[in-house]
Each structure stands twice: as C-alpha cells, then as structure tokens.
Image (cartoon, coloured by chain):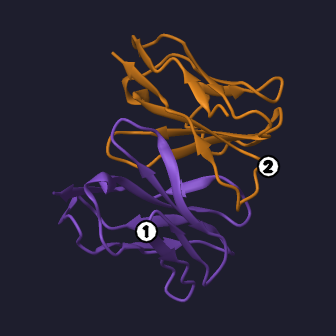
Chain colours: A orange, B purple
Amino acid sequence: GAGVSQTPSNKVTEKGKYVELRCDPISGHTALYWYRQSLGQGPEFLIYFQGTGAADDSGLPNDRFFAVRPEGSVSTLKIQRTERGDSAVYLCASSPAGARTDTQYFGPGTRLTVL
Amino acid sequence: GNSVTQMEGPVTLSEEAFLTINCTYTATGYPSLFWYVQYPGEGLQLLLKATKADDKGSNKGFEATYRKETTSFHLEKGSVQVSDSAVYFCALSESSASKIIFGSGTRLSIRP
C-alpha cells in the first residue's frame, strides 16, 4: 500500500513569506506527527494529532507555526513570516493509533529553504 | 527532560567487520526504544524496536537489547556489508506520550 507522502518535496521561499507543507498519512492511521530535521541532526518533534485534534503541540517553536488536520487525514503545516532559521527538512509521520509502542512511518520530507 | 545520546560519527569500517553503535537514554517511566535508519537518498525507516526492559529487537542482522539497568540500547551487527552504509538514529518514545525523541545520528560508512 501507499506510504506517507509529502508535498512539495522542495520549497524555496523568501524571508517573510508564508508557506504551507502538506502531508498525506497512511490510510487508516489515526495518529499523525510533524518533525523538523536540521542538517546533521536528528528529527525534532513539532506536533502530534490524534484524529482531528492536536494532542500535543509542545514542540512548535513559536506562534508563527501552525498545523491543521481538519478531516483526520491530510495535514497541513503552516509557517508565517518565514525566517532563515526555519530552513530544514520537515518530516511527517503516521502511526496506527498513537500508542507509545507503535511504529511511526515517515514520509520523504519537504526541504524548506528560506532565502 | 528525556533525551537520547548516541555515539558520534562518522564511523568507517571494512566489510564483514563487527559493528557497535552506542546509545544511552534518559527517561522517566518506561519508554519504548527504537533504531531508525536513513539510507542515502531515502526517507527515515524503522530498523528495530523494543518496548520493555530486556526485550531484544532484531532485523536484517542487526540487534539491540533494552537494558534498563544501564539505560542503554546499543546497536550491533556481526558482519556489516557495504549496503549498511547509512545514518542510524537511536530514539525513544516516552511512556506518557507517543512523540519520538531522536539522538543526533551516527553516519556509518562501510568500505568494500
């Protein structure tokens, strides 16, 4: 079956612009996660959805970052007034139920470059 | 807070050598432990996992044992291949939450 997909694969924007990154999780997975990976580092947690609601948004760095999952499937990560420090690979993952023992399946990521 | 510390790379070995990548963690409660791998040009994928103390995870010849007494989850393989060249991430998911906390990764290169 299809894995987690993310679009676009690459996004180049200018400082101050608004961007949206999309994630399509594995069908039937109720849990969806966003992570951010800077060069040479491990992924860092941003936000976790269980169904349509954000169950844990403790990793969002500031109020410029926002994410939605209105129908409990596709999710969009939104970044306002982008800064050069936002440049990173943004990873989406999904898991069947969000249990701590579940395997999280990762998408290929969106590479965001802020000029 | 909870954290994962893993062996810094890069690690370079000859084919058929024995591999150990050290990983230790700090966590409250009873986390699940994972090794994820990122092959060149590919996405992050689960290599193996262990969900409770003394469990051993294994896959593709790799093994790691959940050691609560030493808070460790070292990755081992008896005979590495060129195709094992990748970046390896040790990780945990907290007992009270399902988000994953990753280590900084270890780049492994295997010489033919």
Is residue A30 toward the left or the right of residue B1 in the image?
right
Task: Assign the C terminus of chain A to one quadrant of the image.
Answer: top left
The residue at the far bottom in this view is B69
Residue A93: image quadrant is: top right
Amino acid type, mark 1: Gly
- At a point 43% along the width and 68% down the height, the residue shown is B61
Q: To which residue does mark 2 refer?
A: A97
- Front residue of A1/B93: it is A1
Mark linked to residue B61: 1
Q: Distance of mark 2 from mark 1, alpha carbons?
A: 28 Å
- Front residue of A12/B52: it is B52
Q: Is residue B1 visible?
A: no
**Disc 1 chain ID:** B
The image shows residue B71, relative to residue A1, as above or below, that is below
- At a point 42% along the width and 75% down the height, the residue shown is B74
Mark linked to residue A1: none
Is residue A71 toward the left or the right of residue B36 in the image?
right
Numbered disc 2: secondary structure: loop
Task: Assign the N terminus of chain A to one quadrant of the image.
Answer: top right
Can you tell which of label 2 and label 1 is closer to the viewer?
A: 1
Where residue B68 appears, x then y in whole percent? Answer: 57, 84
Q: Is residue B45 visible?
A: yes
Where residue B34 appears, x then y in whole percent? Answer: 55, 63
- Front residue of A47/A95: it is A95
- At a point 53% along the width and 35% down the height, the residue shown is A91
Is residue A42 toward the left or the right of residue B66 in the image?
left
Where residue B75 appears, x then y in whole percent? Answer: 41, 71
**Disc 2 chain ID:** A
Q: Residues within 10 Å of mark 1 (few under 14, many from 20)?
A: few
